[in-house]
Image: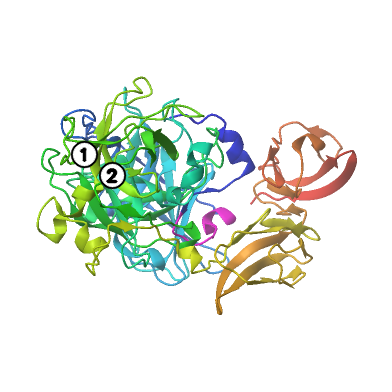
Amino acid sequence: MKRTGISFFLILFPWFIFAQISIPAKPAGNQLTLKQSVPIVKLTQTKKPVIKPNKNGQPQPLYAGTDIPVDNNILSKGIWNQLADGRYVWRLGFRLEKAEGVNLSFADLHLSAGDKLFLYNTDKSQLLGAYTKINNAANFATEYIHGNVIILEFNTNHKPLHLPFHLVDVGDLTNIPKYGFKDFGDAGPCEIPVNCPEGNDFKNQKKGVARILLKEGGSWYWCTGSLINDTKNDGKPYFLTANHCGENSTSSEYAQWVFFFNYESPDCSRPTTEPVHQSVSGSQLLASAVNNTDIGSDFKLLLLDTIPLTYKPYFNGWDRSGTGSSHGVVIHHPQGDIKMISTYNTALVASGYYGNSNPDGLYWTVHWAATQNGHGVTEGGSSGSPLFNSEGLIIGTLTGGDALCTDQTAPDYFGRFSKDWESNGSTASRQLMPWLDESQSGIEKMPGFDPLLQEAVPDFSSDVQTVSIGNTAQFINLSAGPITAYLWKFEGGNPATSDLKTPPPVKYNQIGDYQVSLAVTYAGKTRKKVKDNFISVRSVIYPNPTHDGKIRILLGSYKQEDISVAVYNTLGQPLNTFSPQFDRNSVHIALPHNQNGLYFIRLTRKGESHLYKVLNFHR
């Protein structure tokens, strides 16, 4: 698992957010100073990792980690604090010594209006949440936090008698000798990012492909799959993958599967910092092949809980005619890494799994080709990925094979979509047809569906979210769809409104936390996105006085080489231990937390200096 350069990225962007369905919010326990430290429970893994063979014989998904079951009484070790504004905060941490990632699985999640649930790591570089009542479910699992410690925080307006969730296990995504914990940066060197020129003809198709973190028998595995269209063309969240991906998962485990969309490099490079992505949790099994590649085509059809339009999803089309293709691609997540693309340019051959040519075979035999930017293949974690023909339609899903970066000419095998249709059995649970063609239209080729050709979704971000008095924020329009008009509203800002697609910089002159909203008009309809407390306006230096020696100086947009900071006591003596830490738009300084008194801070920017007084009052 490679993470070159990620620490620099996290310094620039504190709260590195991975967007599982949630609302933008900050944990109250980290906005305010709480006297008690978070208790950390140490957990020890006693189960052996379930490593399954991935080549030859019956295929298996790529191992990612194992759960540590916990008694829900462990939550009694958490602590409550009441904040000055009346809200309550509950917190508890978990440490898994050898883990490279940690996630949590819940049962009976029933948050009330105003409740917020967060997960983060100790240095606050990664945040999941806020999860709210929209996430309520009988079973719910989260993405993982990198590292071996995870903090669980619950914010509520009214302290309940019992926490509104049960914790059932803690995921130990562990570095296993020989196998390792595979995710970002671990794909083979021959793999080609999906946004290279090889993917130019598949820009829609890639939006439907997702990485899967799946649960089976208390262990976690990596696979790939795709959203798939039905003949109603209605955006129902059907999802196609391979049956060997969690072939023995229970209904409660399917409900905890996590699907990662848009997890890709923005260009043709192999990035050194992990890209932000979007995910959903929860699915149910609708249909699958039998668990035997000799008599089944290894397909699985799921129904996901929901796909937000903000993810800009695409429901891939399909061809069930059984006709092969002379060229096409597979889009996949090898080794649980970012989205890659591999190309074939020799005609597909129908065959058995690891079998000879057979016109009625259940599988396509595929050989990969060298292209402009490499010679992509498939690897562990690619299982279930969609095989596209020259028209960009799904004609198969990956079962297995021998292709590797070290053996690029070896074949791979994809279950044939035409055999998935109704050749695995006579019941709806063994066929795609009853689900993807409920009306029995008989369509053989179904194009893909882009809901944003009919619907619009408003969304936005900004260059900064914390602004010093008198400074500006620049808002970035992330909306999509057939939009004809925009209306921005900036609470506390100047201008207060804008009807431009990209508004001018907005100036803030009063301390406070302000709402921003964006309404879009399309096809005679209006949709609105509201983000409460999105912009925080603060004095240039805060908090002042400080009670723990920690202060922040807002800089706005800057280059670190243009900034210098010096700290002096009341005698004019310089301090050399204040450890300035630069982030996205400010510098953090740690004064001697146990030495009360007045301090002077000189901030120099491009030769221009300002002197600030700060009172350090240790309680």
Magenta residue check for 431:
no
Residue 398 % position (x, y) = 28, 39
Position of 352 relative to 119 (above/below): above
422 left or right of 329 in image = left
Residue 107 % position (x, y) = 28, 58
Locate the N terminus by quadrant: top left
Q: What kind of element bears circle 2?
A: strand
Asked whether the viewer can see residue 216, the reply is yes
Q: Which residue position is annotated with label 2?
A: 396
Determine the image quadrant of residue 136: bottom left
Front one among 346 and 385: 346
Residue at x 58%, y 70% (from the top left corner):
530
Q: Amino acid at mark 1?
A: Tyr
Q: Amino acid at mark 2?
A: Gly
Q: Which residue position is annotated with label 1?
A: 363
36 left or right of 518 in image = left
- Magenta residues span 20-31
| Residue at far top of view | 406
The crowd level at tag 2 (other Cα within 10 Å; few <14, some 14-19, many 20+) is: many
Labelled pair 2, 1 in contact (Cβ < 8 Å): yes
Determine the image quadrant of residue 503: bottom right
Front one among 573 and 507: 507
Position of 531 relative to 336 (above/below): below
Residue 198 % position (x, y) = 49, 37
Residue at x 25%, y 67% (from the top left corner):
441
